Amino acid sequence: MTARYLDQFESFLRSDAARASASVNDRRRAAIERFAALGFPTTKNEDWHFTSIAPIAEREFTFVGARTGDVTRGDLEQFGFGADDDWHTAVFVNGRFAPELSSLSRLDPGVRVLSLSTAWTEAPDLARRVGTIVSDAERHSFTTLNTAFMPDGAALHVPKDVVVRNPIHLLFVTDAHAAKTVMYPRNLIVLDRSARATVLESYVALGDATYFTNAVTEVGVGDGATLTHYRIQREGRRAFHVGTIEARQERDSHYVSFSFATGGSLSRTNVYTTLAGEGCGSTLNGLYMLDGEQHCDHQTKITRACWTGAHTACSTARSTFSPWHRRPTVSRRTILCSSPRRRRWTPSRSSRFSPTTSSVRTARPWGVSTRRRGFT
């Protein structure tokens, strides 16, 4: 099942190698070799116990390196939020940056939003952060596969003490040209000390093509910084979507995440954050709205790093607790949409939603509060 991805990688590297440094391409090659060793996860993997990715692994998706698509500004109006004139928007069509559809001319001083394919050469100081935030990536097949390609995406940097007044919208659009293809958006969001920003990351579709999106977003929140991060998944109803957010928070930082999923035939969202400093806080919220035969899986993981470098404690697994000067505050909420007669909740570590049942599995370690709400 992995052989065709290895073949596509070799073709991609020959065509795309000039756009990145030798070190980036070495990292890509190491990632594809690791993916070949891992293969796709199965339901025997604990993290994927409730979700079979066979519909993805058994299909043949083609990677298209060049930009495709016939999207216009009028097509994008349905994906706005009523205040887009004041927002900063970066649009990607079928995985590639579309500058003519984007509006980034009024960014706050010092704030940078550019495509990753451009950042490789024009902003190497920012691009070199790609891959440094993801923790334990070698265990995650889809993250390593994304790292092997990562042809484009958004690179966003907010310098210290800057407050971005209006939201930044990263809009990923697919159209009919994406049929039977795979896309690997790779995003980087970095906030320096005491910066503040609101970022929306949207995945939407024009039409009902069958395609696969494998997206990874790395988030770095500096000392005293605050990031409010919305992730909206409105893919086509026949699409497949695997998305991972990896955040790393420094001292006194705050990361507020809200994930909303309503599209896709099969979708999986991972939201992982590492509390790497004293006094930092993390809020992870989620909303799912499904019907028919849609399958949606959502996993959150909060890792508390020991600042002496001795141990870590993870909110979704066995925990080894470390001495604290000030304990981080963690809030995690899951909002379920299902029939009240079919809803159940059991303590463990991931979320699965189907047309008939909804179950949330979360661990509740020391120092972490877990809340559950049901809406009908």
Image (cartoon, helix red, strand yellow):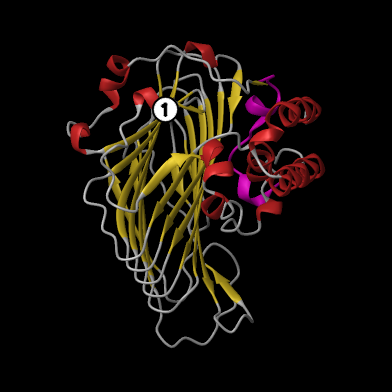
Q: Position of residue 98 (x, y in %)?
A: 43, 25
- Residue drawn at x 34%, y 15% is 72
11 sits to left or right of 102: right
| Quarter assignment of residue 71 | top left
8 sits to left or right of 203: right
Q: Position of residue 147 (x, y in %)?
A: 65, 43
Circle 1 packing at 10 Å, graded few (<14), some (14-19), many (20+), is many
Amino acid type at mark 1: Gly
Q: Position of residue 214 (x, y in %)?
A: 57, 35
Q: Is residue 136 above or below residue 23?
A: below
Q: Is residue 331 visible?
A: no
What residue is shown with label 1?
263
The magenta segment is: 45-61
- 55 in magenta: yes
Q: Quadrant of the C terminus?
A: top left
119 sits to left or right of 23: left
Q: Is residue 97 above or below residue 220?
A: above
- 75 in magenta: no
- Residue drawn at x 54%, y 74% is 305
Q: Quadrant of the N terminus?
A: top right
- Residue drawn at x 68%, y 20% is 59
In the image shown, does 133 or 43 lie closer to the viewer? 133
In the image shown, does 174 or 159 lie closer to the viewer? 159
28 sits to left or right of 126: right
In the image shown, does 333 or 6 lie closer to the viewer? 6
Q: Is residue 58 above or below residue 250?
A: above
